[in-house]
Image (cartoon, coloured by chain):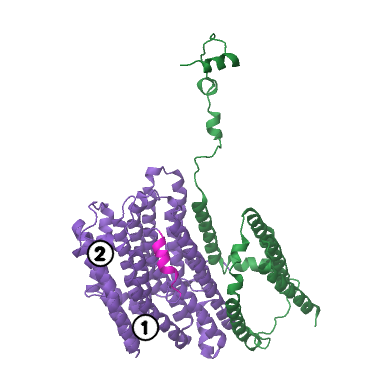
Chain colours: A purple, B green
């Protein structure tokens, strides 16, 4: 069978990212220590090119390529664009932090770009095999990034935990995949969906496989009770890496869950709905309650992530197109929010000092009013206070859940969100009503300030005018 | 019972027994060697399934390369097995209970009720003209070319990560850079002529001892 070069069109963004990673890998060899910033510029150009290519090849009918291994549809276009934007933001925030600590090595950019490549592959995967390879590409790059600061004991420990639990999660996921392959005889999601629709939940093997798939997804997302690694990794990883792994990969994980459960196993919806409901309630509950007790803000963000993952699951388990669209909206805006919140921490850090305790945010308003305002916006959004986008996201998810007559779930989510508002608002209180503990000025570059401004204002703007993004999300689930 | 079935049970029994030995040996080197036995019998099972290429690759790659490397690592690292095993007995009851539960579930699901010969009749044996390696290569480089390329990127990431995490520039090594060595100049780099006084007081052990005894 001759190769049709039209196959290459849908994966142009992936090709751009891979070429950029290879170029950075080679160029880095010839750079002097003081010119390492070139890697940064190259990586950003690569992300920009991939973004433009996503727009150029995007839109229109769903396309399958590489014998059904790759799919390009409206969902993949939107999620890819989101993942690329958020990754670019995190790279911009990361640069000063890395430079201050002599960590601005080319490998950081190579590994980050490979992680982005893994995300893009996951987002447009149409077989179990491609999906798994994308997932491992992402995970392997992240393990290395977590241990990037070789002299940090905490970082190595976090990387080890992440690696072991990640391998366990992958194993469970693969076991579930093998069961579903055994029952349906295919690894292509379209064929799996047809076979599952024929057999229904009468087939024990399928239900068994779904249980393992959901557990694997739970591990990768960090949903309770498979959340143990999240706070430790967020605390132990270098701040820019925690920022990176807490933001864009969530978008890819969302794509994974939609491809597996919604596209592949939609006929078993009643089975996975119950499992997701348990994970969602536990995540929202434990995440919000445990976050209150944290004094380390990176750990607090870890628990906050767990609670947000619960909300994403809520939208998905509704099982309606409205629910999927709202979960997608929530995921995209959450990634943006997480990048911004960690970004503030990298800005507050300086040579020889890492901002990671709640106290470090005290009196931010007196030190830099603009960053204080941005952080306040981000925290209000995380808590779900109108008019920020966090409120819109929660509202849309809850509406979708209520529409499918699961009012009790919505009530539980609202109850724990109110508890959760406490620790976000405590951060705002520290910023505005406490005296600064240090007089050291905050020094940032123009690029970081511009990125943070765009990030913070996007949170406000998307909250005030959510229609455009929401329309795109709804178009992805016809 | 046909001869093939007999072979299958032989190799399956060897595989299970040696896998048990892998996890129960005290000496890690023995455990690695038992693992080699497990792999070889696994390869034999694959060849019985007419997957000749995979069977041979399993022996070449895993037994030939990976396990030898493993053996090196085990011999070089001084792993204290006693501490690793300290909690083995303590956690054995819980672990065994979970393992038995899982085994029961798996047998219930994967057993003959769902995957028996009635559901999946054994395919007819392939003729001599079927080339296993050729077929595998054809499907790898046509249908599955995208996953193959991804696997290549995955290996690249593994290399980059391994080098980043382990390679350090050490300043205390005594290695010599040949490039610097060959640029040495005849004059000042190679010989240094030190001027010393040609005459002076004769120094013998006696005169030195006298000089020491003299009060200052």
Q: Nearer the viewer, residue A133 or A468?
A: A133
Q: Residue at x 42, y 83 (%)?
A: A278
Residue A230 in the magenta stretch? The answer is: yes
Chain ID of residue with mark 2: A
The residue mark sitting in front, 1 or 2, is 2
Pointer 2 local density, CA inside 10 Å: few below 14, some 14–19, many at least 20? many
Spatial separation of the CA atoms under disc 1 and disc 2: 33 Å
Residue A6 in view here: yes
Q: Are marks 1 and 2 in contact (CB under 8 Å)?
A: no
Say which quarter of the image contains residue B47. Answer: bottom right
Query: In the depicted view, which residue is nearer to us: A224 or A75?
Result: A224
Q: Quadrant of residue A418?
A: bottom left
Residue A405 at x, y = what percent? Answer: 34, 91
Quarter holding the N terminus of chain B is: bottom right
Question: Could you tell me which secondary element the residue under label 2 belongs to?
Answer: helix
- Specify which label sits upstream in the sequence, 1 or 2: 1
Residues at marks 1 and 2 on the same chain: yes
**Residue A467 point in image, percent of width and height:** 26, 76
Query: Which residue is located at x 62 percent, y 67 percent?
Result: B138
Vertical order, A15 against A168 (above or below): above
Residue A466 located left or right of residue B42: left
Q: Which mark is residue A375?
A: 2
What predominant SS class does the magenta segment belong to?
helix
Q: Which residues are magenta?
A: A226-237
Q: Position of residue A141 (x, y in %)?
A: 47, 60
Q: Is residue A58 visible?
A: no
Give the residue number, with chain letter if any, for mark 1: A321
The secondary element bearing badge 1 is classed as helix
Label 1 marks which chain's residue? A
Q: Residues within 10 Å of mark 1 (few under 14, many from 20)?
A: some
Residue A390, quarter of the rendered image? bottom left
């Amino acid at each position: 069978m001759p190769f049709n070069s039209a196959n290459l069109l849908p994966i142009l963004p992936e090709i751009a990212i891979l070429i950029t990673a290879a170029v950075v890998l080679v160029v880095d060899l010839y750079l002097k220590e003081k010119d390492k910033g070139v890697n940064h510029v190259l990586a950003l150009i690569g992300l920009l090119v991939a973004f433009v290519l996503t727009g150029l090849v995007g839109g229109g009918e769903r396309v399958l390529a590489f014998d059904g291994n790759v799919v390009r549809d409206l969902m993949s276009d939107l999620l890819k664009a989101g993942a690329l934007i958020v990754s670019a933001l995190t790279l911009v925030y990361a640069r000063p932090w890395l430079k201050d600590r002599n960590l601005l090595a080319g490998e950081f950019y190579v590994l980050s770009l490979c992680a982005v490549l893994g995300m893009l592959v996951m987002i447009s995967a149409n077989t179990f095999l491609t999906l798994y390879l994308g997932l491992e590409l992402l995970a392997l790059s992240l393990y290395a990034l977590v241990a990037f600061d070789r002299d940090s004991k905490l970082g190595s420990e976090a990387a080890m935990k992440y690696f072991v639990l990640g391998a366990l999660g992958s194993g469970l996921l693969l076991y579930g995949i093998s069961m579903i392959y055994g029952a349906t005889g295919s690894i292509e999601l379209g064929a799996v969906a047809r076979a599952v629709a024929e057999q229904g939940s009468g087939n024990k093997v399928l239900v068994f496989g779904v249980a393992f798939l959901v557990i694997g997804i739970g591990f990768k997302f960090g949903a309770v009770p498979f959340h143990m690694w999240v706070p430790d990794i967020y605390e132990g990883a270098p701040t820019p890496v925690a920022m990176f792994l807490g933001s864009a990969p969530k978008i890819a994980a969302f794509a994974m869950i939609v491809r597996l459960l919604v596209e592949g196993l939609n006929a078993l919806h009643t089975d996975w709905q119950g499992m997701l409901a348990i994970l969602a309630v536990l995540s929202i509950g434990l995440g919000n309650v445990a976050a209150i007790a944290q004094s380390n803000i990176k750990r607090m963000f870890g628990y906050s992530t767990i609670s947000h993952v619960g909300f994403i699951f809520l939208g998905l388990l509704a099982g309606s197109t409205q629910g999927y669209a709202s979960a997608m909206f929530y995921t995209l805006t959450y990634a943006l929010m997480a990048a911004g919140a960690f970004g503030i921490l990298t800005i507050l850090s300086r040579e020889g000092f890492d901002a990671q305790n709640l106290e470090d945010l005290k009196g931010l308003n007196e030190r830099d009013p603009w960053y204080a305002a941005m952080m306040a916006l981000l925290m209000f959004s995380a808590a779900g206070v109108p008019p920020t986008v966090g409120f819109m996201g929660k509202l849309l998810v809850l509406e979708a859940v209520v529409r499918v007559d699961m009012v009790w779930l919505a009530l539980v989510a609202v109850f724990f969100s109110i508890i959760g508002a406490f620790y976000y608002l405590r951060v705002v209180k520290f910023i505005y009503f406490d005296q600064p503990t240090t007089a050291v000025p905050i020094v940032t570059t123009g690029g970081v300030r511009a990125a943070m401004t765009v990030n913070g204002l996007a949170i406000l703007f998307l909250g005030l005018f959510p229609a455009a993004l929401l329309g795109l999300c709804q178009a992805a689930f016809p | 019972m046909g001869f093939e079935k007999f072979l299958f049970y032989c190799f399956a029994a060897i595989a299970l027994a040696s896998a048990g030995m892998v996890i129960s040996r005290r000496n890690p080197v023995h455990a690695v060697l038992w693992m080699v036995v497990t792999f070889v019998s696994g390869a034999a099972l694959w060849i019985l399934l007419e997957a000749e290429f995979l069977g041979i690759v399993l022996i070449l790659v895993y037994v030939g390369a990976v396990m030898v490397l493993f053996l090196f690592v085990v011999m070089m690292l001084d792993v204290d097995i006693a501490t690793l095993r300290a909690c083995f007995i303590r956690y054995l009851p819980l672990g065994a209970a979970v393992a038995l539960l899982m085994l029961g579930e798996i047998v219930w699901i994967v057993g003959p009720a769902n995957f028996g010969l009635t559901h999946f009749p054994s395919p007819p044996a392939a003729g001599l003209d079927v080339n296993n390696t050729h077929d595998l290569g054809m499907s790898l480089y046509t249908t599955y070319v995208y996953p193959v390329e991804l696997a290549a990127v995955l290996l690249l990431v593994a290399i980059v990560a391994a080098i980043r995490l382990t390679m350090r520039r050490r300043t205390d090594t005594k290695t010599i850079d040949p490039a610097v060595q060959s640029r040495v100049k005849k004059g000042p780099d190679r010989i240094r002529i030190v001027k010393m006084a040609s005459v002076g007081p004769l120094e013998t052990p006696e005169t030195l001892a006298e000089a020491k005894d003299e009060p200052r």
